[in-house]
Amino acid sequence: MKKLGLLVLLLVATRAARCQTAPAPLPDSVQTFLDKSLTLLETYSLERGTVNWPQLRQAVQQKAQGAQSVRELLPIYPFVFEQLKDDHGWLTYKGKTYKWRNPARTPYTNTAVKAALAKKPSVLVKMLPGNIGYVQLPGINAGGSLQAMRDAALVVQDSLCGIYPDKAKAWIIDLRLNDGGAMAPMLAGLAPLIGDGHLGGFVDKDGKPDQQWYLRQGNFYMDTMQVTTLQNRCPVRRTNKPVAVLLSGMTASSGEIVAISLRGRPATRSFGEPTYGATTSNESHRISGNSYLTIAGMQETDRNHVIYKTHLPPDVLVPGGDDFTDLRKDAKVAAALKWLKTARK
């Protein structure tokens, strides 16, 4: 009898332990949100092939235990993005973003650039001595509508028309304070300077070409889809003049796309520091309501089909020496001007 009683106790203890470890089901709305977001990542993420998805789903399900609302799921998403090595994507929930901060990124220490960016700079166009045109192009967040894209591109173009652009013998395009946003208005706004043609494109994880981007008659196209509808208010006679591009560690995302679009262009050279390294194409997918998952799903290539997997190194390294209040004292501007003197001959 003692043995039988011990056996009963062992069975009861085993069942109790199983009851304690068995995962409690999540509320339907929470489980649906979690499942949909994981499915989107498994379908579209650039690094989706590097992950064991059954194991990741199991790990995420365990971390989600006890969540009674979507809000309680949110701390899980940086973990998920970390497994996909995606520090360019994020989850948006009720206006807030949740992403993975990659500890491997070296902190950017150029205080002059960071201070200038903190002042929320706007588009600036001026003529430097020697008839060198200067364009400071910060990031542009234009929203998703075609009208918003057109209006943002018009701001850039109108700034160019504020001077006499045909008078410029060469150009400096300053992307040091361009931390991203919408690529279409940036490139369409610069169209009078850089000219029409194929600028670059996206490729999948295997290098297979996807969407390509172009300037045609001064407007931005994604493949055959016209994104901006601008009429050139101040056409220039020559769009093949030398261009110097200025870069910093804060040049990121769509700012890097602008830089990539200028790579391989004749008589074009970049100066400054390596860019941030967010050279992946993001696409937003709606989960529910105003909740979106933004996923890095493609890599970017220039017009010569060179793929950029991390940051863009400048052609000429010029660390520090930035002076946005007095460009005459700016080391990167000085290096660009020195090269432009020889490029114009």
Image: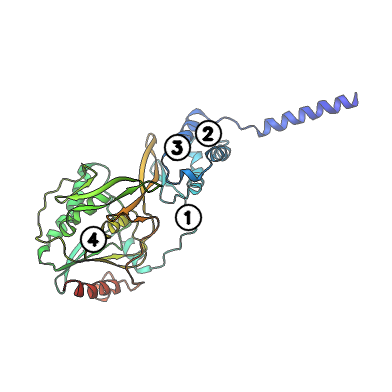
User: Separation of disc 4 and disc 2 at Cα?
Assistant: 54 Å
Asked whether, in this view, residue 308 is left or right of residue 18, the answer is: left
Determine crowd level at label 2: few under 14, some 14-19, many 20+ residues with C-alpha closer than 10 A: some
| Dot 3 alpha-carbon crowd within 10 angstroms: few under 14, some 14 to 19, many 20 or more | many
Secondary element at image label 4: loop
In front: 14, or 118?
14
The x and y percentages for residue 307 are: 35, 54
The label shown at residue 68 is 2
Label 1: few (<14), some (14–19) or many (≥20) C-alpha neighbours in 10 Å: some
Q: What element carries label 2?
A: loop
- Quadrant of the image for the N terminus? top right
Which amino acid, by three-letter code, is at mark 1?
Answer: Asn
Distance between the alpha carbons at the discs numbered 3 and 4: 40 Å
Distance from disc 2 to disc 3, alpha carbons, whole Å, reads: 17 Å
Which residue position holds label 4? 265
Which comes before the other along the chain, label 4 or label 2?
2
Q: In this view, does 266 lie to the left or right of 96?
A: left
Which residue lies under the disc numbered 1? 102
Residue 326 visible, this angle: no
What amino acid is labelled 3 in the image? Ser
Residue at 54% x, 36% y: name it.
Answer: 67
Q: Name the residue tied to disc 3.
A: 37
